[in-house]
Amino acid sequence: MELGYDRASIDEIADRMGATKGRVYHYYRSKTDILLDVHQDTLALMTAAIKEEMAGPGDALTRLRAMARRHVLLMMEHFAYARVTMVSTTQLDGGTERQRQAVRGIRDARRAYEHMFAATVEEAVEAGLTRELDIAVATKAVLGTLNWISMWYDPSRSGAAERREALADELAEFVVCGLRRPAG
Amino acid sequence: MELGYDRASIDEIADRMGATKGRVYHYYRSKTDILLDVHQDTLALMTAAIKEEMAGPGDALTRLRAMARRHVLLMMEHFAYARVTMVSTTQLDGGTERQRQAVRGIRDARRAYEHMFAATVEEAVEAGLTRELDIAVATKAVLGTLNWISMWYDPSRSGAAERREALADELAEFVVCGLRRPAG
DNA sequence: GTCTATACCAAGATAGAC
DNA sequence: GTCTATCTTGGTATAGAC
């Protein structure tokens, strides 16, 4: 989270655990495997939560708002994971076959995650709740608003639960308004 | 753009120039200096352009739309620079005093850049053009939508000028709608 | 101004004692 | 399961010929 993948050396990681390399390598075969694990855990956690919200009550825009809110709250709550997952997405590449397979799995999981948002946007469009828009681009816009949190949120500064709720509400409102058909 | 800062070795850079290390080090004292230059050039270019749009005609939301459009078009046109600037923002740290000073300059320039958007959002709020919102968060939301392009746009795939214009319009519309006071 | 050759070091990974 | 010691490599940077 603080240093990025490349700058975070195994020695540094071990230091923060109050240990040495040996311990790290007892649990992980390689540095890449650690990163892959972080991605998998984060995606699994967030996918489960968003799937829940997606199945909730209300029309498509109401559910999209709930998904956005939840997404923001999860990112803030698990900020270290979220930030790593966002920032190092493009750097995923496996050396061994096992790792390449893991990378493919992660890419698929990411696509599936984004697709939950895209599908809900599409539903909103078809229900006539939105202005005229391109579904793919609108989905990127929504996720951009939400994911960009990983670039500016500082958990040590605004970590209070109420503050997080307020941020989540504000950003959810922004994306819903960005899509919604103007009244009248 | 393709590999990120750490993975892009000087050897690789030289290769793509059809040269060797020697040439690179003839023009740059260190790898860090190359990155600092990319940041400075990008910020200078974009700041000049957005300042223009900011001084344009129309109310605050109209100008914000123009700024957003221009921001998107610039990011796509200078995509390699834009992507590097976004992705490596947090990795800027200077070893020498000269570099630390450059980093400070870049941070200030970034703040000033963001402030142009924040000031225009504030103007829109004060003119009563927006719904009720937190200016700082709304500005982050706007820039998130726009900057997230650096994570998904593929210039080799959708590089046609009309396509770029359409993307810029779509995203600009999204952010304006995200802020605007609902009619009625 | 550009190259080759090389110094030098940080960091990933392993071996083996305890 | 954890450590220390060590191997190995890739990558930044420099020296100096052309």
Image (tube, coloured by chain):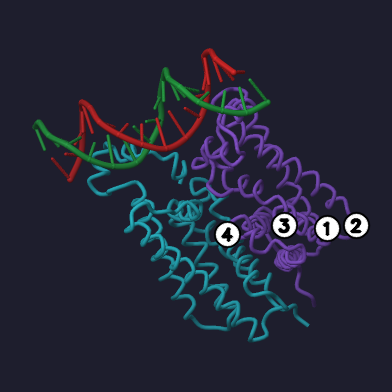
Chain colours: A cyan, B purple, C green, D red
Please report contact status of discs 3 and 4: CB closer than 8 Å, yes or no.
no
Q: Residue at x 46, y 53 (%)?
A: A79
Report if residue A41 is visible in the image. no
Q: Chain of mark 2?
A: B
Question: CA separation, marks 2 and 1?
Answer: 7 Å
Q: Residue at x 60, y 38 (%)?
A: B18
Of the pair B169 and A52, the residue shown nearer to us: B169
Q: Indicate which label's residue lies in the foreground, 4 or 1.
A: 1
Q: Residue furthest bottom?
A: A127
Report helix, strand or loop for mark 3.
Answer: helix
Q: Which mark is residue A167?
A: 4
Q: Chain of mark 3?
A: B
Report helix, strand or loop for mark 2.
Answer: loop
Q: Amino acid at mark 1?
A: Arg
Asked if labels 4 and 1 share a chain, the reply is: no
Pointer 4: residues within 10 angstroms few (<14), some, or many (20+)? many
Q: Residue at x 52, y 73 (%)?
A: A115
Sequence-earlier tag: 1 or 3? 1
Sequence-earlier tag: 3 or 2? 2
Residue B74 x/y as whole percent: 74, 52
Q: Quadrant of residue B164?
A: bottom right
Sequence-earlier tag: 2 or 1? 2
Q: Which mark is residue B57?
A: 2
Please report contact status of discs 2 and 1: CB closer than 8 Å, yes or no.
yes
Q: Is residue A56 above or below residue A175?
A: below
Report helix, strand or loop for mark 1.
Answer: helix
Question: CA separation, marks 3 and 2?
Answer: 19 Å
Q: Amino acid at mark 2?
A: Pro
Q: Which mark is residue B72?
A: 3
Q: Chain of mark 1?
A: B
